[in-house]
């Protein structure tokens, strides 16, 4: 499964400083600051090590920020539905274009959609998506917060939990411990 990661290596100083339509985003760079890559580069690197095809969308990406098959950058970019269709989409945009990225993933036909955000942040974004006409049934399929419960705190641990979820989804795994799936309790009981 191919993976499309919507990211931002700068943080928004205000709520989603973008002008957008269905396929195009223009980011107001004056409302974004700093240089903070977050988990996206680590997720991308791990996925590449596992043989996935990875596409990054980061308006502020610089050479060497990501290990990916394709990096789309620039304060104005277009993402046609064909780029999203049937992919696993990860949204990690640090409030720069969260709503647009999730809407694009849903309407563009992504196979799975996850987002790196708190439940508190998700409540704000999901309300916007609902108001835009996305049905609740569709919202219930989103993987927010992204990743499996590893109780990770560091960025690399969070990235690992996200990659583990992507692998589980693409391979049809459950994410439950193998000892439970393989029945270790029964083996011990029969001893």
Image (cartoon, rainbow, N blue to C red):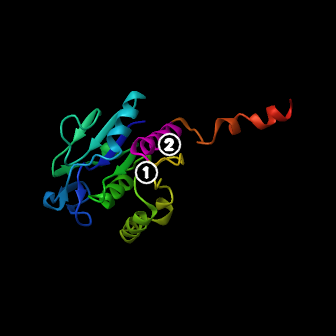
Dot placed on the residue nearer the N-terminal end, 1 or 2: 1
Which quarter of the picture shows residue 106?
bottom left
Measured from the top left, where is residue 94 in percent x and y? Answer: 31, 56
- Residue 114 is labelled as 1
Residue segment shown in magenta: 154-170
Q: Residue at x 38, y 39 (%)?
A: 43
> Is 41 drawn above or below residue 99 in the view shown?
above
Q: Is residue 104 left or right of residue 31?
A: right
Which quarter of the picture shows residue 96?
bottom left
- Residue 165 is labelled as 2
Q: How many marks?
A: 2
Q: Residues within 10 Å of mark 1 (few under 14, many from 20)?
A: many
- Residue 162 is labelled as none
- Asked whether residue 156 is drawn in magenta, I would say yes
Tell which residue pokes out farthest to the left in this image: 30
Dots 1, 2 in contact, CB < 8 A: yes
Residue nearer the viewer, 158 or 163: 158
Q: Is residue 113 left or right of residue 25?
A: right
């Amino acid at each position: 499964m191919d993976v499309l990661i919507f990211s931002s290596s700068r943080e928004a100083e205000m709520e989603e400083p973008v002008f957008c339509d269905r396929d195009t985003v223009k980011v107001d760079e004056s409302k974004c600051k700093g240089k903070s890559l977050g988990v996206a580069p680590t997720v991308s690197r791990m996925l590449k090590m596992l043989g996935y095809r990875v596409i990054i969308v980061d308006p502020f990406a610089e050479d060497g920020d990501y290990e990916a098959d394709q990096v789309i950058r620039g304060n104005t970019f277009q993402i046609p539905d064909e780029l999203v269709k049937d992919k696993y989409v990860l949204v990690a945009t640090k409030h720069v274009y969260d709503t647009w990225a999730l809407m694009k993933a849903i309407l563009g036909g992504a196979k799975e959609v996850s987002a790196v955000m708190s439940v508190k942040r998700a409540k704000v974004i999901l309300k916007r998506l609902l108001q835009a006409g996305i049905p609740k049934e569709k919202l219930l399929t989103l993987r927010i917060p992204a990743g499996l419960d590893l109780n990770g705190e560091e960025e690399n641990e969070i990235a690992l939990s996200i990659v583990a979820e992507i692998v589980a989804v693409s391979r049809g795994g459950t994410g439950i411990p193998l000892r439970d799936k393989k029945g270790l309790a029964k083996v011990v009981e029969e001893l």
